[in-house]
Structures are given as C-alpha cells and as structure tokens.
Amino acid sequence: MTYFIEARGLAEFDALLKSLGEAVAPAAASAINDTAAYARTLGSKKIRQRFNFKAGYLSGRLGVTRRASTGELEATVTGRDRPTSLARFAQGAPSFGKQRTAPKVRVSTSGGGQAIRNGFFMRLRKGSSAVSSENSNVGIAVRLAEGERVRNKRQMVPISNNLYLLYGPSVGQIYRTEAEKTVDEVSAHLAGRFSHYLQRSI
C-alpha cells in the first residue's frame, strides 16, 4: 500500500497557472520533487525517533517512488509493506545450539528490551520464501505447544508444524502513521520551495 502526503495549497496552482503563465508548472514540479525528498528524510527521522531502525536500513525501504513533472504535479513517498524480521531488533549477538539463550528485542526506542518467551534464534536458508535477506539469514522463531495461541498472528509466519517466525511492524505501516504528523511541516516546505523556484523563473 502506498501512502500519499497531501500538501495543502496545491489546489491553488490552477489559478496561479492562469495568472503567471508557463513559469508556474516547472516551478511547481521542482518544488514538489524537493519536498518529496524532504518528506522522505523527515519521515525517516520520525520513524527512528520511535523505533530502533538504522538510517541505512530505511534508505532502501523508504523512498520517493514517483517524481512530479510539469504534466503530473504529484510525487509519492512509499514505505515498504513487508513485515520486518524481529531479529532486526534483537539486543546482543544471536546464539545457537546448546548455548543458545532466549532472544531479547527492543522494537521501540522507549522502554527496555523484551524477552521472547519460548523464542530462539534460527538460521535461515538464503532466499527462503518465508523471509528476505533483510535479516542476514537469521530469524527469531517460537514453537507453540499443541493448542497454544498468540494474540497477534499477523506478525507470525508458519514454517513448520507449530513453528513460527516472528516479525515486527513494516516500514510502510509505521510511515503511514508518522507521515500524518508531518503534513504542516511538509506543506510549509513546499510553499517555501515553490516561491523560491517561481522567483527564479519570472
């Protein structure tokens, strides 16, 4: 799913086109593209303030997927909707075999880590259909007892009988929430950039 940031004031562009002529559309397209990059950077910052993602991890999973042109004055910032392996949020190095310890994860930047009851680190086959390479072929799994249930099965992927891989929220899921909080900042940036490019054109 793609989330669109609606910048306030874009409806006035039609009136400006009539009054200022051909200079408006190129200025608007440049301003929107600048603002899309700004919105992406701001979104990444907001996400990292609340969740333990690294900037480098987000760089390939949150980006400008559509740029504006003079014929299409719209740009899109998209966050990937594939769930994030819970191993991405693990505290400490993974342990395996007889020496393995229960994983402890910290998804949110607030509060401490949380131990995964009955959970363990699991080496995964490269290219496994259940996971992507995002977790460096290590996942956190849990084996449920017969008849045992969990509250949020949307963040679990079955890999064998009663064995599940655990996931956290996707980048896209978080970004949609955080983007709604940045509308005023993004709109102000758009207005400033539009004025800048328009003054250069006329």
Image (tube, rainbow, N blue to C red):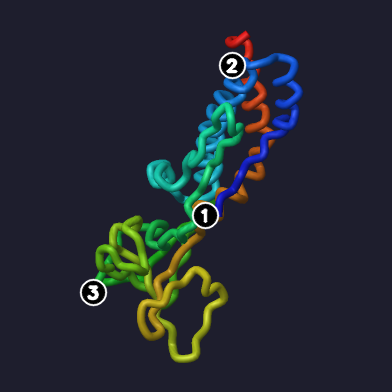
Q: Give the image location of residue 72, x and y in percent.
A: 59, 33
Q: Give the image location of residue 151, x and y in percent.
A: 57, 76
Q: Which mark is residue 3?
A: none
Name the residue: 31% across, 58% down: 133
Q: Which mark is residue 97?
A: 3
Vertical side of 187 occupied by 179: above or below: below
Q: Which mark is residue 108?
A: 1
2 or 3: mark nearer the eye = 2
Q: Which amino acid type is shown beneath numbered disc 2?
A: Tyr
Say few, some or many: other residues with alpha carbon within 10 Å of mark 3 (under 14 / 14 to 19 / 20 or more).
few
Mark 1 to mark 2 CA distance (whole Å): 40 Å
Q: Give the image location of residue 115, x and y in percent.
A: 44, 68
Quadrant (top left, top right, bottom left, bottom right) of the N terminus: bottom right
Q: Which amino acid type is shown beneath numbered disc 1?
A: Ser
The one nearer the camera, 13 or 192, is 13
Q: Dot 1 lies on which element?
A: loop
Name the residue: 34% across, 58% down: 135
The one nearer the camera, 7 or 166, is 7
Which numbered disc flags the more N-terminal residue, 1 or 2?
A: 1
Return the residue at label 2.
197
Q: Are marks 3 and 1 in contact (CB under 8 Å)?
A: no
Q: Which amino acid type is shown beneath numbered disc 3?
A: Gly
Vertical side of 32 occupied by 78: above or below: below
Q: Dot 2 lies on which element?
A: helix
Mark 3 to mark 1 CA distance (whole Å): 28 Å
Which numbered disc flags the more N-terminal residue, 2 or 3?
A: 3
Mark 2 to mark 3 CA distance (whole Å): 61 Å
Q: Are marks 2 and 3 in contact (CB under 8 Å)?
A: no
1 or 2: mark nearer the eye = 2
Name the side, left or right, on which 86 lies relative to 176: left
Name the residue: 40% across, 45% down: 60
The one nearer the camera, 76 or 39, is 76
